[in-house]
Amino acid sequence: MHRPAGHRRVRNPSGAPALLSNPVTISATSLAALLRRERIGEPHITVSPTAMWLDSDERREEDKRTGEEIDGLEVTDQRGLDVEFAASLAVLCRPTTEYYGWINEGKTTLAVLAGAIGREAVLAVRENDTVFLNQVQPDKLPEALVSQIPEFAPAKGRPINVAQDEVLAEVERARQPTGVITRTASHAVRQVQSISALPTDGGGELYAAVRDSVGRRTHTEHPLRYADTTEGRWLNITLPGQTRTMLVISPGTRRDIAQRLRDMHGAISG
């Protein structure tokens, strides 16, 4: 994959076929312009450019730059946009299956989408205004997304299951004036507090979403979060129940994250 100087190398998901002919690097601004020009649709939130106000001169200069960048991709001919490339771009607008989120590593934040329409599947990774596109296997979307998460040792410890209202109640009690007598927090809540206080060097927030046959989109109500702490990687997910909403905090690997994402997808699939 070509990458401009100064940009990190996007991790290549293993086993990814080169159906995009070649991986593509394009600015988010030019990508949005191309999608509008070809009337394909609006870009997914993860690859949308940052909105900026431009005066008329700046707008003309921006239009010229994006036009030159799009022409440089060599994805059009006399008949218009390459059909296979157009199919890949459609995935960036209305995937029927998608896994997406934001990944922090040190001072770098990536927005990532692994989506598919049928057998057409694409991994899109945005860093600042640069988007990297690559074809992936449609049955390996969680793994494609997770490939962008750095390897990190899982924390040592057992999973913690605690009611969300217990944690929130303890947060509220901590705000009480000094001297007010309150109930001691449970062992599970104290464990959650201890983990939350650990220094971190990275983390992420990940979601799953699906579209039905008429285009209605359903996404997970709660994200899967992970934190790379000084004691290892912890996963954090909220699971609504019939009577109480539970927080499940557990040590996790990249494989565990992929499985959690599959579970999230299964919960919203009809």
Image (cartoon, grey):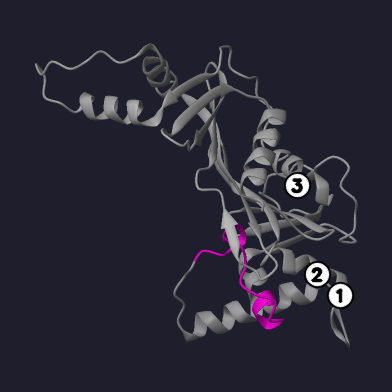
Mark 1 and mark 3 residues within 8 Å of each other at the beta carbon: no
Amino acid tagged 3? Leu
Q: Which residue is mark 1?
A: 83
Q: CA distance from mark 1 to mark 3?
A: 22 Å
Rate crowding at label 2 as few (under 14), some (14 to 19) or many (20 or more) other CA atoms within 10 Å. Answer: some
Mark nearest the camera among 1 and 3 is 3
Would you place residue 217 above or below residue 179 in this image? below
Rate crowding at label 3 as few (under 14), some (14 to 19) or many (20 or more) other CA atoms within 10 Å. Answer: many
- Of all residues shown, which one is farthest toward the left? 179
Would you place residue 252 above or below residue 184 in this image? below
Judged left or right of residue 35, residue 206 is: left
Amino acid tagged 2? Ala
Residue nearest the observer in this picture, 202 or 96: 96
Residue 141: % across, % down = 75, 47
Residue 70: % across, % down = 74, 74
What segment carries the magenta color? 34-50
Q: Quadrant of residue 226?
A: top right
* 167 in the magenta segment: no
Q: Earlier in the sequence, mark 1 or mark 3?
A: 1
Amino acid tagged 1? Val
- Of all residues shown, which one is farthest toward the front? 242
Residue 16: % across, % down = 86, 47
Q: Which residue is mark 2?
A: 87
Judged left or right of residue 39, residue 159 is: left
Q: CA distance from mark 1 to mark 2?
A: 6 Å
Tell me which residue sits at (22%, 15%) in the image.
183
